[in-house]
Amino acid sequence: MMYRSLVTGCGAYLPAQIVTNAQLAERVETNDEWIRQRTGICQRHIAAEGEMTSDLGVAAARDALDAAGVAAGEIDLIVCATSTPDETFPATATRIQHRLGVPQGAAFDVQAVCSGFVYGLSVADNFLRVGQAKKALVIGAETFSRILDWTDRSTCVLFGDGAGAVVLEADKAAASANGSGRGVLSTHIYSDGSHHDALYVDGGPSSTQSVGHLRMEGREVFRHAVVRMAEAVDAALEANGLTPGDVDWLVPHQANIRIIESMGRRLNLPSDRVVVTVDRHANTSAASIPLALTEAVGDGRIQSGDLLLMEAMGGGFTWGSALLRW
Ligand code: ACO
């Protein structure tokens, strides 16, 4: 490959409004203890009325550009991972492109639900590797609160709104470095459409001409999540000649603390090497990995040279992993 992608900055945005488990218990038959024990979630952020996925995405993107020291005018690729676009079309990425004042390049959405960020990273990384783009923004932005059935306690307690973003820059020197060099080492993405009924939204432009609500068989998703993500992690390590012992940080999709902890155990990682935000953010779908990354970079946990492992699974099913050296 001619180039390798370096993450030169990351950023985040969370809507101001916080909804606690106790507040949810006023709306549906649930309680703080059930939610905490089953999921690890204590609270979630919910977008304000009129605040859209693109608003969240723009804020996270600006934060990432600032961190990278890159001007919006230098960006030539925007990939926005979202399952909750502002509109059926155009892509939310194009709205973000306009708001940021990016005058060139391509902007499009990637739809892989909770695996969206890993998918988006994979797409952008491949553009950069072959030289088709030089500086990319990969954004995960979601307003799942808009597609939840707020009368269904088995799903409405699990999700939150938010956005995270990274700036990726094509780097020639990193491409010629060996496996110890910095940047995105690999991405592995997968899907299996036979599991549609376990996690889907019961609406859309071509089926019902409405937006619909999220429907989920929680147990079925749980069972597959651990197995599938473990396979993706094994593929990532094997492709790079690395072992679980080489991983410094697990930066996982944040769906459920039990899924996160079981992945950590499988990798033999001490719990303080696993980045957890699910307690405060709940499941923000495509936004959860860049939100977690930004937190752990911001507080100094993640240091230059560290090996980061990302993994996710979502509706489709889709799943995948990414390995990168910070
Ligand atoms: N409050 C109180 N009780 C509840 C609630 C609630 N919010 N929701 C469900 N219950 C009840 C159920 O009605 C059921 O009662 P019953 O036994 O009287 O019928 C009981 O709790 C157990 O329900 P289960 O669904 O079997 O609970 P489970 O232990 O499987 O936990 C959960 C449910 C948390 C959804 C779990 O299956 C899970 O985390 N699955 C993974 C799903 C997920 O993370 N999806 C995110 C999208 S995909 C991804 O990102 C990986």
Image (tube, rainbow, N blue to C red):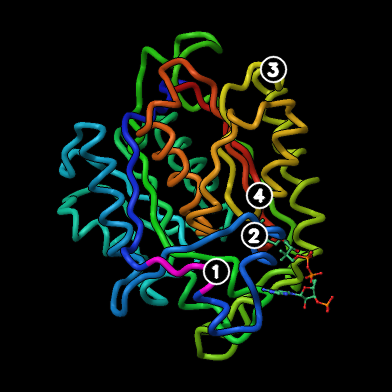
Q: Which residue does the numbered mark 2 point to in the structure image?
A: 36
Q: Nearer the viewer, mark 3 or mark 2?
A: 2
Q: Mark 1: give few (<14), some (14-19) or many (20+) Cα within 10 Å.
A: many
Number of numbered discs: 4
Label 4–label 2 contact, CB within 8 A: no
Q: Earlier in the sequence, mark 3 or mark 2?
A: 2
Separation of residues labelled 1 and 3 (CA atoms): 36 Å
Separation of residues labelled 1 and 2 (CA atoms): 8 Å
Label 1–label 4 contact, CB within 8 A: no
Residue 286: which numbered mark, if any?
A: none
Separation of residues labelled 4 and 3 (CA atoms): 22 Å
Q: Which residue does the numbered mark 4 point to in the structure image?
A: 257
Q: Amino acid at mark 3?
A: Gly
Q: Which residue does the numbered mark 3 point to in the structure image?
A: 245
Residue stretch in magenta: 18-22
Q: Residue at x 53, y 72 (%)?
A: 22
Q: Position of residue 217 (x, y in %)?
A: 76, 71
Q: Nearer the viewer, mark 1 or mark 3?
A: 1
Q: Residue at x 29, y 61 (%)?
A: 94
Q: Secondary structure at mark 2?
A: helix
Q: Which residue does the numbered mark 1 point to in the structure image?
A: 21
Label 1–label 2 contact, CB within 8 A: yes
Q: Position of residue 308 (x, y in %)?
A: 54, 27
Q: Compare residues 319 and 263 and report the one nearer the observer.
A: 263
Q: Earlier in the sequence, mark 4 or mark 3?
A: 3
